[in-house]
Image (tube, rainbow, N blue to C red):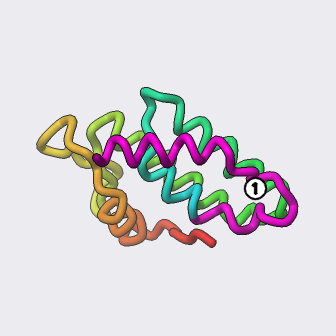
Amino acid sequence: MIEHSRAALFNSLNLVQSDHPSIAQNTFWPLFIAGTEASSRDGSRAVVEKKLNQAMKRTGFSNCEVALQFLRALWFARDEGHCLSSNHNHIKIPDKGREVNWIQFARNWTSSGKQFLVF
């Protein structure tokens, strides 16, 4: 069921016009959430990144670059089996292949002094 929902999310994401002047500012949060579910295996990360960049270019809201930096770090952590820590740059997750929870990752991200803001 979850995989079906995820597939439907990314099929719909292809229809989002993040560079359309009247809706670009409304796409950041949905794109961010999609990014937390994006995978390196199916190209969904590239779609999220492209659409976030389109929305930032259209709106001029480059402050959402922080959200993209966060997603890139989350993706890296998932690919490498690491998680940001407030005490170290990276710590090893005991179960290699375990899915890194983006909310916990965000808590670790902010506790290490990094900004976390999506709007």
Above or below, 119 against 71 in this view is: below
Residue 5 vs residue 99, the one in the foreground: 5
Q: Which residue is mark 1?
A: 55
Farthest left residue in view: 94
Quick check: is 10 in the magenta stretch? yes
User: Callout 1: few (<14), some (14-19), or many (20+) C-alpha neighbours within 10 Å?
Assistant: many
* Quadrant assignment, res 24: bottom right
Q: Which residues make up the magenta segment?
A: 1-29
Above or below, 118 against 65 in this view is: below
Looking at the image, which residue is at 44% across and 52% down? 36
Above or below, 11 against 117 in this view is: above
Looking at the image, which residue is at 87% across and 61% down? 21
In this image, 6 relative to 15: left or right? left
Residue 96 vs residue 45, the one in the foreground: 45
The x, y position of residue 20, in whole percent, is 83, 56
Residue 74 vs residue 37, the one in the foreground: 37
Query: From the image, which quarter does the C terminus lie in?
Result: bottom right
Quick check: is 21 in the magenta stretch? yes
The x, y position of residue 42, in whole percent, is 47, 28
Looking at the image, which residue is at 45% across and 31% down? 40
In this image, 24 relative to 44: left or right? right
Looking at the image, which residue is at 66% across and 57% down? 65
